[in-house]
Amino acid sequence: MFRSKIIGFLAFVLFFFIIDLYTWQGVKLLIKNTADQTKRWIAAIYWGYSISLVLFFLAFRFFQVHMEPVIIRFVAAFIFSVFIIKIIWTLFLVIDDIIRIFRWFTRDLGLNKTPGYESNSNQQGIGRLAFINYLGLGIAALFFSSALWGVVKGAHNYLVNKRKLYIKNLPKSFEGLKVIQISDIHCGSFWDRKAVERGIELINAQKADLIFFTGDLVNDTASEAKPWIDVFKKIQAPLGVYSILGNHDYGDYVSWESAEAKKKNMDLMIQNHRDLGWDLLLDESRIIEKDGSKLAVIGVQNWSEKGRFPKYGNLEKAYSQSEGADTKLLLSHDPSHWRAQVLDAKKDIAVQFSGHTHGMQFGIDTRFYRWSPIKYLYKEWIDLYTEGNQSLYVNRGFGYLGYPGRMGIYPEITVFTLKNKA
């Protein structure tokens, strides 16, 4: 195990070194006309940061180093943003190298007199194209500034998304029922309490009849929720708040001292939901009756079609408790569950409510076009999907994980009004 850690760490360092070496070539072009003393200072800062970063990861990988979680998240966000700058810049430098190799092959033919090239070696060498270098740096800097805005403003830019949800054979007594969905709170990541409280006020201002929370209350351990119980317990609705667990709620991403310690964490997680006043569904159904009609809220534990996420949920067990309901709504954290076990297989489940993807907290999210890198991992990754008489809604999430912000895809409070589908 230790040997594999060493090999993985060395591979990680080698990858970072290659990226740093590449971007250093771009830096040298930028500073080629500065004084030698300035060049030495810039080199010391550039490589000093890189060495410090390696030591930082070394300390966290192999030694017990304690830092406040909020500090860790902001440090990680800064490191991530700087690294993305280097990656973007490197892509442009690679393009430049391809052009340079081509020019090197054609030099003897006299075809390499392209204007705009600056030599950073000697007059006989093939210099870099300054335009490509500056363009790459400009785009990388734009991304960095957007990432900073995503932390300062985007993280808590709560959007209320109002949707009409059409359901086949919806009983008249449930026509116009207002349902709110929130998902992926990840309270262990929060750093602005007042901003989160404004989000809770937005939820309550919608005056929903029914509220669903579709998993991931915490990042790693149940104790992360304790400082936030008094905030989120303010979420209330006349017909109840129903919740399920997400993949982060089981403590699977922590190295526990014993199986008993992990069990205590799960017991605390269940108690958290009780303290919030939420009805946690662990492969269970609840029946809501109104004017002789029945609506079933089916809640399953995390179940994912993706191999690296857990399959704790038992849909059959939860579904069996919904017998006799006129309308069936499913809460399942991972959207891949819909196509794997729900769509066509359980035709009387009208809607599945999911979260999990966060829209990757980065992308383009408009009425006309939506894109995020997460779409290459999940076929259904954001908003509403309908096939036949069955629908899936993938909520954008209320919180954030890893990167403490959002760029383009913002935290969501979804307000559904149930309508009968003609």
Image: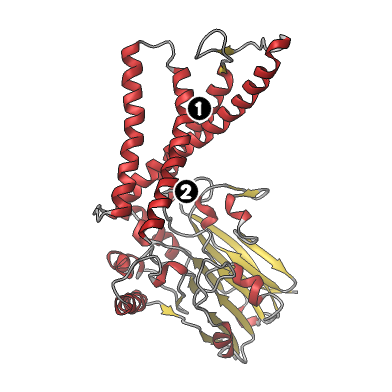
Image quarter hosting the N terminus: bottom left
Question: In screen coordinates, is 17 left or right of 383?
Answer: left
Label 1 element class: helix
CA gap, disc 2 and disc 1: 22 Å
Total numbered badges shown on the rendered structure: 2
Which residue is pictured at 53% across the width and 87% down the height?
287
Q: Is residue 86 above or below residue 113?
A: below
Q: Is residue 22 above or below residue 192?
A: above
Which residue is pictured at 46% across the width and 82% down the height?
282
Image quarter hosting the C terminus: bottom right
Which residue is pictured at 38% across the width and 41% down the height?
78
Residue 203 lies, in percent from the top left, at 44, 63
In the foreground, 314 or 227: 314
In the rendered image, which residue does mark 2 sit on?
Answer: 406
The three-letter amino acid code for the residue at tag 2 is Arg
- Using the rendered view, name the quadrant where residue 349 is placed: bottom right
Residue 202 lies, in percent from the top left, at 43, 59
In the rendered image, which residue does mark 1 sit on?
Answer: 137
The three-letter amino acid code for the residue at tag 1 is Leu
Are the residues tagged 2 and 1 within 8 Å (C-beta)? no
Mark 2 or 1: in front is 1
In the foreground, 416 or 278: 278
